[in-house]
Amino acid sequence: MILFLLFCEITKTNIMFADMSVEGVFRKNGNIRRLKELTVLIDNGDPFDLAQEGAVQVAALLKKFLRELPDPLLTFKLHRLFIASQSKHGKTSYMN
């Protein structure tokens, strides 16, 4: 879990400081060939520098990482709790 949080923090920082004018950073796919290269580097433990990648590419790497997690971050079992945590009074009308 610590590795995941560290990865997310690095990714967020990279995206925030890369180029805030990039529109649809999480909607776009990035370069698939480069995504595979970065994945191999990470899996092998080889050094890589996310600062050299564009915001769209880093977002694509984060999306790939989240897709490949063995268990989803937002589980169905905890769905009601997630929804309640985002409401003003801890309840929403569609939770019943």
Image: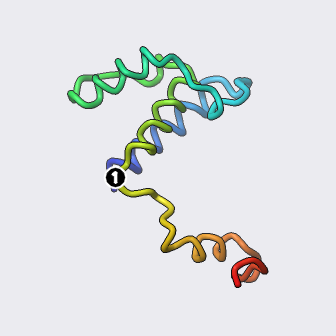
Q: Amino acid at mark 1?
A: Pro
The residue that appears at 54% across and 39% down in the rendered structure is 12
Residue at the spot 75% in from the left edge and 79% down from the top edge: 92
Residue 54: name its quadrant.
Answer: top right
User: In the rendering, at what x and y percent does residue 86 appear?
Assistant: 68, 70
The image shows residue 96 at horizontal and vertical percentages of: 70, 85
Asked whether, in this view, residue 64 is left or right of residue 48, the answer is right
Q: Locate residue 71, reporting x and y percent.
A: 38, 57
Task: Tell me what residue is drawn at x 50 percent, y 28 percent.
Answer: 58
How many marks the image carries: the answer is: 1
Label 1 sits on residue = 70
Q: Position of residue 51 (x, y in %)?
A: 47, 22
Q: In screen coordinates, is 55 left or right of 95? A: left
Q: Where, by quadrant of the figure, is residue 81 drawn?
A: bottom right
State the SS at label 1: loop
**Which of the 4 image quarters holds residue 45?**
top left
**Callout 1: few (<14), some (14-19), or many (20+) C-alpha neighbours within 10 Å?**
few
Q: How is the image coloured?
A: rainbow
In the figure, 47 relative to 75: above or below?
above
Quarter that holds the N terminus:
bottom left
Image height of 9 relative to 39, above or below: below
Q: Residue at x 44, y 25 (%)?
A: 50
- Say if 18 sits above or below 16 in the image: above
The answer to whether 48 is drawn above or below residue 10 in the figure is above
